[in-house]
Amino acid sequence: MKDNGFMIDSDGICLFITLTLRTSLAGRLVLIFLNIVCAGIIILATTEKITAMALAFTLMFLFLIRYSLWNFYGKEYLTINTKSIRYQHDYGFFKTTPQTNKIGTSLMVQAQQIYQTGKSKQVRLVFISHDENDFPEEVYHVAIPITQKNANAVVRGINLLYLDKVTDNYSLPPIHMN
């Protein structure tokens, strides 16, 4: 099984991260089967005029379609700067509205180990900030797990953003890493 997709880019002010979900073929086939069964029950309940059953399975079908679209086409877009984290989920046919969470005095990234069968070790990123009273609070956690190597790239990118912020705050010459 392939690892989930990962792409990172920076313009010096923001860090742009795109995570792509890659599910197994067996999982996709199960979702297709469940969607077909649920649609069949809705059609049967509608033709037999069983309204309550048709409504219940229609609601279930809508949730199942959303879950299926996420597993087939799911992408997560993150934009991080020293003041906020902006995220958006892409379901293939529609995107959620971008949400922005403010960052306090600092930003820390924590990689939580998760285990999945058939994939290499994966981690889930948790972004933790400190509020005005210096208490840690979770700002955001990603929905799509990534490899430890990719998590380290995110940490390096965030460290570079804050390194540039420190040089700007103290009027130091910019630091260029070769």
Image (cartoon, rainbow, N blue to C red):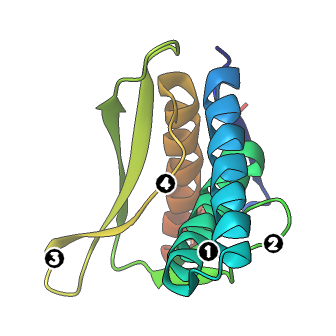
Q: Percent x, y for residue 92?
A: 83, 59
Q: Percent x, y for residue 5?
A: 71, 34
At label 3, which amino acid type do we have? Asp
Q: Is residue 168 above or below residue 29?
A: below
| Real-space Cα separation, disc 2 to disc 4, in angstroms | 19 Å
Tell me which residue sits at (50%, 13%) in the image. 120
Secondary element type, mark 4? loop
Residue that numbered label 2 is attached to: 94
| Real-space Cα separation, disc 4 to disc 1, in angstroms | 29 Å
Q: Give the quarter of the image for residue 164.
A: bottom right
**Badge 4: how crowded within 10 Å, few (<14), some, or many (20+)?**
some
Q: Is residue 122 above or below residue 143?
A: above
Secondary element type, mark 3? loop
| Real-space Cα separation, disc 4 to disc 3, in angstroms | 23 Å
Query: Can you see residue 14?
Result: no
**Badge 1: how crowded within 10 Å, few (<14), some, or many (20+)?**
some
At label 1, which amino acid type do we have? Thr
Q: Is residue 92 left or right of residue 20?
A: right
Q: Percent x, y for residue 57?
A: 55, 69
Residue that numbered label 4 is attached to: 142
At label 2, which amino acid type do we have? Phe
Q: Quadrant of the N terminus?
A: top right
Tell me which residue sits at (73%, 60%) in the image. 12
For the image shown, how many numbered marks are present on the structure?
4
Q: Which mark is residue 58?
A: 1
Of pointers 4 and 1, the one earlier in the residue sequence: 1
